[in-house]
Image: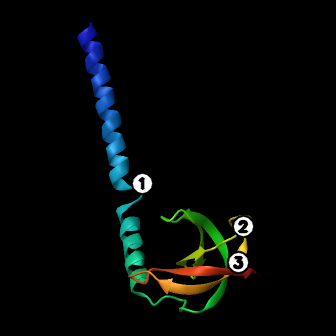
Amino acid sequence: MLGAASLVLGVIVVVAFASWVRRRTSGGSRSSDRAESRQRHRNAQKREPPVDVGDVHAAAIYEFSDHHTGERHAVCKVEGFVVFVEDVPDDLEATDVIEFKVLSFNRGYTSATATYAGRS
């Protein structure tokens, strides 16, 4: 009897594992959605950034990120373009609107670094 119980348990484990693998590889969305998302990503990488070095912009803080130096950076978006803002005060929260001055771009021009210029 123990052999049959082990076999049933083994089948349940295999089915559960196969189901988990299928969800992980499919990403939970249809292949047409994934293809459309990849195309949007490629198009975004090819477009010119909506900001220039030296520009001052105002935007809401989307979230906070810990930089590899240990500093807390605010993550803001300008027309979907990601800007990491340095030197933000500790009392700021997500959704607060701040002003920042763009300092530089990353190597691929897919994001920018800015410095905090005040509350908006």
Q: Nearer the viewer, residue 101 or 75?
A: 101
- Depth order, front residue of 104/39: 104
Q: Position of residue 30 (x, y in %)?
A: 39, 60
Could you tell me which quadrant the N terminus lies in? Answer: top left
Q: Amino acid at mark 2?
A: Leu
Binning the other alpha carbons within 10 Å of mark 1 as few (below 14), some (14 to 19) or many (20 upward) gives few
* In the foreground, 59 or 41: 59
Label 2, label 3: how many angstroms apart (C-alpha)?
Answer: 9 Å
Q: SS of the residue at dot 3? A: strand
In this view of the protein, which residue sits in the foreground, 68 or 18?
68
Q: Nearer the viewer, mark 3 or mark 1?
A: 3
Q: Residues within 10 Å of mark 3 (few under 14, many from 20)?
A: many
Q: Name the residue located 37 percent from the left edge and 72 percent from the top edge.
A: 38
Disc sitting over residue 28 in the figure: 1
Q: Position of residue 92 (x, y in %)?
A: 72, 67
Q: Position of residue 81 (x, y in %)?
A: 52, 80
Looking at the image, is mark 1 or mark 2 earlier in the sequence? 1
Q: Earlier in the sequence, mark 2 or mark 3?
A: 2
At numbered mark 2, what does the secondary structure look like: helix, strand or loop?
loop
Q: Earlier in the sequence, mark 3 or mark 1?
A: 1
Which quadrant of the figure has residue 110?
A: bottom left
Q: Residues within 10 Å of mark 2 (few under 14, many from 20)?
A: some
- Quadrant (top left/top right/bottom left/bottom right) for the C terminus: bottom right
The residue depicted at 38 percent of the width and 82 percent of the height is 108
Circles 2, 3 touching at the beta carbon (< 8 Å): yes
Please give the residue where the numbered disc 2 appears in the rendered image.
92
What's the CA distance linking mark 3 and mark 1?
A: 35 Å
Q: Amino acid at mark 3?
A: Ile
